[in-house]
Amino acid sequence: MEYIQIGFTKKTHGVKGELKIIIEEVFEDIFLEADRVFIEVRGNKMPYFIQNIRGEGDLIVLFEDVINKDQALLIQSKPVFMPASELPASIEVPDDGLEYTFLEGFVLSDKNTGEVGTIEEVIDMPQQEMAVVVYKGREILIPLDEQIIVTISEAKKTILMDLPDGLLDL
């Protein structure tokens, strides 16, 4: 089955198992009507049934069987998918033209520092694509440049980089 990424989970919200979720604008109406979505966990797309959605912009979602913060932590910062067969033919899947968008949800590590954090978003800046990562409680931008990327493992959802000294301290 072919899946289309429609967004990604962000942080947990509260202690009842809710998550903040970002859904690409073109898919919002379909998401709001959906019974379930698929979230990639350990390389497998697992169905999660939607119990409640509230909020605007960053939606706050409660999934069935996710009853506390610990369970929600297992699916935070993960890509959210829907089967392509369930999307109307009239929807054009956006192609943002970014080379590294597929890295959203990957765990970024530095060969010297170790694990830095999960890539929450890949954004286009005038000079290059940047990974948005929360490191030590603050958002940092990390350049996605082939000269500092050591390895990318799509199977493990990891990226190893050789970050310039001081970058994580900015």
Image (cartoon, helix red, strand yellow):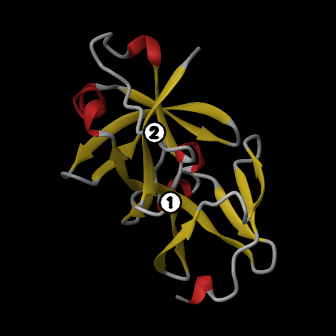
Q: Amino acid at mark 2?
A: Gly
Q: Which residue is mark 2?
A: 97
Horizontal side of residue 153 vs 15, given as left or right: right
Q: Which residue is mark 1?
A: 128
- The answer to whether residue 23 is above or below residue 93 is below
Question: Residue at horizontal 52%, vertical 23%?
Answer: 3
**Image position, residue 75 (x, y; %):** 54, 50
- Counting every numbered tag in the picture gives 2
Q: How far is disc 1 from disc 2 in space, using C-alphas? A: 12 Å
Q: Picture quarter containing residue 169? A: bottom right
Q: Picture quarter containing residue 14? A: bottom left
**Image position, residue 83 (x, y; %):** 47, 19
Q: Secondary structure at mark 1?
A: loop
Question: Residue at horizontal 67%, vertical 63%?
Answer: 108
- Residue furthest front in the image: 127
Frontmost residue, 67 versus 136: 136
Nearer-N-terminus badge (1/2): 2
- The answer to whether residue 57 is above or below residue 168 is above
Q: Residues within 10 Å of mark 1 (few under 14, many from 20)?
A: few
- Residue furthest left in the image: 56
Horizontal side of residue 24 vs 65, given as left or right: left
Q: Amino acid at mark 1?
A: Gln
**Image position, residue 51 (x, y; %):** 33, 38
Q: Residues within 10 Å of mark 2 (few under 14, many from 20)?
A: few
Question: Residue at horizontal 57%, vertical 47%?
Answer: 100
Frontmost residue, 81 versus 97: 97
Question: Residue at horizontal 39%, vertical 14%?
Answer: 86
Q: Secondary structure at mark 2?
A: loop
**Image position, residue 60 (x, y; %):** 30, 52
